[in-house]
Amino acid sequence: MTTPTQATSSSLAITYGDVVAAHDRIREAAHRTPVLTSRTADAMTGASLFFKAENFQRMGAFKFRGAYNAISQFTAAQRRAGVLAFSSGNHAQAIALSARELGVPAVILMPQDAPQVKVEATRGYGAEVILYDRYTEDREALARRLATERGMTLIPPYDHPHVMAGQGTATKELIEDAGELDILVVCLGGGGLLSGSAVAARALNPNIEIYGVEPEAGNDGQQSFRTGEIVHIDTPRTIADGAQTQHLGNQTFPVIRALVDDILTVTDDELVQAMQFFASRMKIVVEPTGCLAAAAVFQGKIDVRGKRVGILLSGGNVDLARFAKLTLGEVA
Ligand SMILES: *Cc1c(COP(=O)(O)O)cnc(C)c1O
């Protein structure tokens, strides 16, 4: 277990002060999402669970926080030229909506085979969508070219201090609203949410235990955490599409290594069970990736008995047909 000190914290990409500043910036636009409780879930686990419901965040996921925090710090010249992102998921919609709110033009690069609903949603928020062929074109090279040609600023989905600090505001709110926590459990893709959350949680509750949870099929974060080096993997096959990242970031990883206690994994089946619980017992729609942290707790992978436990529900963007299929118990 690492014991963070002020000295290590100050060499990391963000400080708690950055999270506080991010919170002041996003307050005008982001929802302060509710913290939900469930007697059934508490009885099941023997703990007091506090669910931070970012499925109720604007555009349906916490990613609005980081995107808005990043774009709102653009200079006048950056605002005129616009923001660029590549994503087929929640980051695309977060950038598109934040850019619209802040009056900044946005270009989103999406693979040609991205679900039509996501392309439409992103266009619906006013962004220009440029489709590319993911098998023949290198999206990073394409993004760099566009950034150079049009002078646009690229905002990555997780490996950026303004994104990380923005994501950390969800945990700041959770602890402010729920009170002191013994344990915090957060889903893990590229580590934007976990790193920001860890910085906020360690500052507010220094003795808190912090866990990241990723899909078993893509446990690069766990391998990286345990070996001390960023491990790269092929795109994992999992229903947790928001956590199909191939590696942690150069800026998120050191924060996670310094402040997090362990990284755990859950299977797709365990995610489905959690999704079913949220739908049937708590009457909320949580997307598969959003269930990662809760699934680890429900499956007894963390000793939570008698503890006050914060659980991040990261988003609720799943189309209805898929939601129906998954909650009816089909993993495929
Ligand atoms: C992006 C995303 C994640 C993973 O977040 P990282 O910051 O990449 O770790 C988890 N859940 C949802 C719903 C997401 O959109």
Image (cartoon, helix red, strand yellow):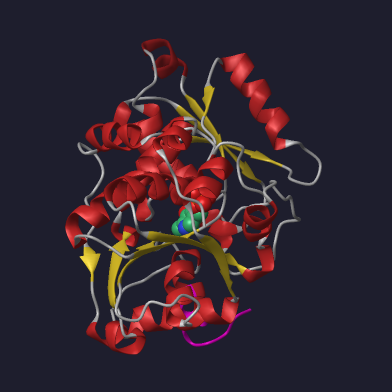
The foreground one among 197 and 121 is 197
User: How far across and how far down the image is residue 322, in percent?
Assistant: 51, 73
Note whether 204 is above or below 17 in the view shown: below
State the residue at coordinates (35%, 80%): 279
* Residue placed furthest toward the top: 77
Depth check: 314 or 225 in front? 225
- In this image, 21 relative to 237: left or right? left
Which residue is found at the position 48% from the left and 87% from the top? 328
Q: From the viewer's perspective, is 278 left or right of 289? A: left
Q: Which of 30 and 120 is in front in this view?
A: 30
Query: In the picture provided, is 331 more to the left or to the right than 76?
Result: right
* Residue 118, visible in the rendered structure: no
Q: What residue span does the magenta drawing correspond to?
A: 323-332
The quadrant in which residue 331 appears is: bottom right
Q: x, y (%) of residue 12?
A: 49, 34
Residue at x-position 18% and y-position 57%: 177
Q: In this view, does 312 lie above or below 9?
A: below
Please provide percent x and percent y for residue 138.
75, 36
Total numbered badges shown on the rendered structure: 0
Q: Is residue 327 magenta?
A: yes
| Magenta stretch encompasses residue 247 | no
| Percent coordinates x, y for residue 289 in the rendering | 50, 64
In-image side of 225 versus 321 (left or right): right
Q: Quadrant of the C terminus?
A: bottom right
Tell me what residue is drawn at x 41 percent, y 49 percent.
Answer: 198
* Quarter of the rendering containing residue 214: bottom right
Q: Can residue 288 be seen in this view?
A: yes
